[in-house]
Image (spheres, grey):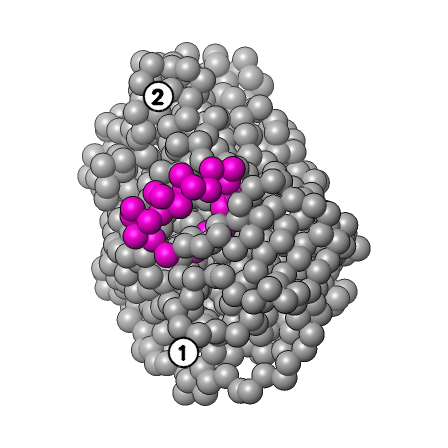
Amino acid sequence: MESSQLNQSIKHTVNTTLKSHEIKAIRESLGREPNEVELLIFEAEWSEHCSYKSSRRWLRELPSESIHVVRGPGLDAPLIKVGKVFISFKIESHNHPSAIDPYDGAATGVGGIVRDILTTGLRPIALLNNLHFGDPGDSYSLWIARGVVKGISDYGNRIGVPVVGGEVWFDESFARNPIVLITCLGVGVEGQVVWGKADPGDVVMVIGNDTGKDGMLGSSFASKALGGSDEMSAVQVGNPLLEKLLIDVITELAQRRLIKAIKDVGGGGLATALSELASQFNLGIRVYLDRIRLRDELSPGEILVSESQERMVVVVDPGRLREVESLLGSYGVDYDVIGELTEGGRFEVYYRGELVADLPVKLITGAPEANHELSEPAWLRGLWELPQLTPIPFRDALIKVLSSPNVASKEPIYTLYDHEVGVRTVIKPGQAGAAVLRVLEEDGDNGKLGLAIKADANPRYSFLDPYIGAANSLAKAYRNVVAVGGRPIAAVDSINVGNPELPDRYWYFVMSVKGLSWIAKSLGVPIVGGKVSFYNEDSTANTVIKPVVAVAMLGVLDDIDRSISGGLKGNGSLIVIGLTDNELGGSEYLHRVHGMVRGLPPRPKPEEELRNAEVVLRLIERGLVNSCMDIGLGGLATTLLKMSATGGVGFNVDLSKTPTNGTMDPVAVAFSETNARYVIETHHASEVMSILREVGVPHAVIGVSGGDSARFLWMGDELASLRVSEVMGYYSSLWGVF
């Protein structure tokens, strides 16, 4: 059979995303024609979603090592160590499923990332979400947004893991292609870490849910543009109550050292989970599909590629199998003993006594790398010039930016989430840019250890310049963590772009990786894991998203009592730390006030970022800071208004006192989104100023906090004044939407 004929045959069977040259490579490696079950295995594992064939050559450029990193990228979740505490965190996308079925798509995204953390044996303690939707005024976009939020809320609340932070972005490019990213954080001690080891003869079990038709070949669905007719069948359906049982039983199995390795059954189903498990240990695996519980009538191939949720594969020493079975039974968690690990490196699949697949494990997990062409879009540089801007009243500009859906408080969303279950949440959603969680009370050398975590992205920046945009995402998350008193120690990333087979889309991806690599190395932050999501476009509507490069940053606080929120307390001096440049390119001001996405985004300044972060942490650790926020989206004026709305306290500032790099007008000073800057409120101005002068950091006292008005001056003359009640009202503009 010719390659083209074989390709057509596969398409008829599984609507394959495999390319002709890939099918040829499979046939030549096997020395025969693969059967239908084997083709489905390759369809799952060689999908872009599972194999990273278009991205892994570039991802090798990212730094991933540090003194805290015990295990970096490569497995389901990394491991970080701080003192006696082990930490794991991971970010995952569920974009395509959420576009088709927003509720189940988002809910199962939560379940999947929680199970990734469970593979380490650590207990999940927190969730974050980064959500990108279309214009909230569009009814279809709003339907997606409401479904996604409810899916996250229902699933997260029912499993008892708090949703402690996030980010929500609105842009018309996400109208039919939402970006739904979930981050999970887990902690534990060495005695419960599942390090991952296995030997021939070890038992392989599937625990949790039974297997059905939902999520069929979801990995292939995520590896092509939207627009097919069979998309609903690729969306999984979650069971959060079963997930809660899995959390409890897995952590106890880990603590009792009853399991040797764990693998989540996620994208690609059992085909991927079992082959990658065997490959991890350079072993083979023999499985018997008729031992697997089914809730639908399925063929052998369908059993392998179903992505039914709440399932995990565990490896158990045969001598401890009865103990494992007894514990699973005590929790009411069902299981199947489906096979064993073997020598020889083969993936052998039996069904009703027949060998239905016999493949080399390393062939399954060794998808060839894809080398696509890349080119900068010809039209892009034409967007970098800014036209003459029509002036508008300063007060009107403040109101437009503060009430922008991207800036406004996300309280209507996060109040739907349980963000306090587990009583670890010290700084909660809405109180600061990053969340802060308690890890241990007084416990030896760790003291009152805390963790700060935040995930950031700016698709407008990444659209205008992917290199700078990606770097900005990491730098912004870095500052968010610093502003609450956390010292950044590691990051994970999620890169979401369009079809990698198109040169301009692939260019956006490659430049994003290079930007992340540059800033991560410059700031000394390892990127310990991540996710790449391609094909975020709709072939029927001919639309593609603005690139989303989200970075979740993890920070450590030695003393949780030193954590700082962002709301003004009153009767303090307001100090700006860092120089402001005339950088309105890609800003919220340009978009909201002038309706344009143009200009070059502000370029990160690693040396200033490191220096300014270090002095802010020093001030916080000495107890000299009452409140703090980094300056980001919307610029200095917006940051001040957010601090006012958060604390319910006014201020009086003279923007002309702001330290700037050259002469600037009030609009540029107010709304520039220059990096490496913070606003702090302090009752110890003289001591703070002395430290800042000693370090050589540009800074200035621009005013004071207090009163019931937010008042902006320029050279002593009033630019605008808003009552605090007005500020809080404009900042709450999304209450009428969700």
Q: Viewed as shown, does residue 579 lie left or right of 142?
A: left
The amino acid on which the numbered mark 2 sits, given as a three-letter code, is Asn
How much space separates mark 2 and mark 1, taking CA atoms? 48 Å
Question: Closer to us: mark 2 or mark 1?
Answer: 2
The residue singled out by tag 1 in the image is 504
Q: Residue at x 47, y 37 (%)?
A: 684
- Dot 1 falls on a residue whose secondary structure is helix
Please rate how many residues cluster around mark 1, counting C-alpha atoms within 10 Å: few if below 14, some from 14 to 19, many from 20: some
Magenta span has 628?
no
Magenta span: 677-698
Q: Residue furthest right?
A: 736
- Dot 2 falls on a residue whose secondary structure is helix
Indicate whether 50 appears above or below 545: above
Q: Residue furthest front?
A: 716
Indicate whether 94 appears above or below 345: below
Q: Are marks 2 and 1 in contact (CB under 8 Å)?
A: no
Instruction: Where is residue 300? Give x, y as percent.
Output: 47, 45
Q: Nearer the viewer, residue 118 or 302?
A: 118
Please rate how many residues cluster around mark 2, counting C-alpha atoms within 10 Å: few if below 14, some from 14 to 19, many from 20: some
Instruction: Where is residue 102? Give x, y as percent.
Output: 66, 53
Which quadrant of the structure image shows residue 470?
bottom left
Instruction: Where is residue 605? Give x, y as percent.
Output: 33, 61
Q: Residue at x 66, y 38 (%)?
A: 417
Residue 446 is labelled as 2
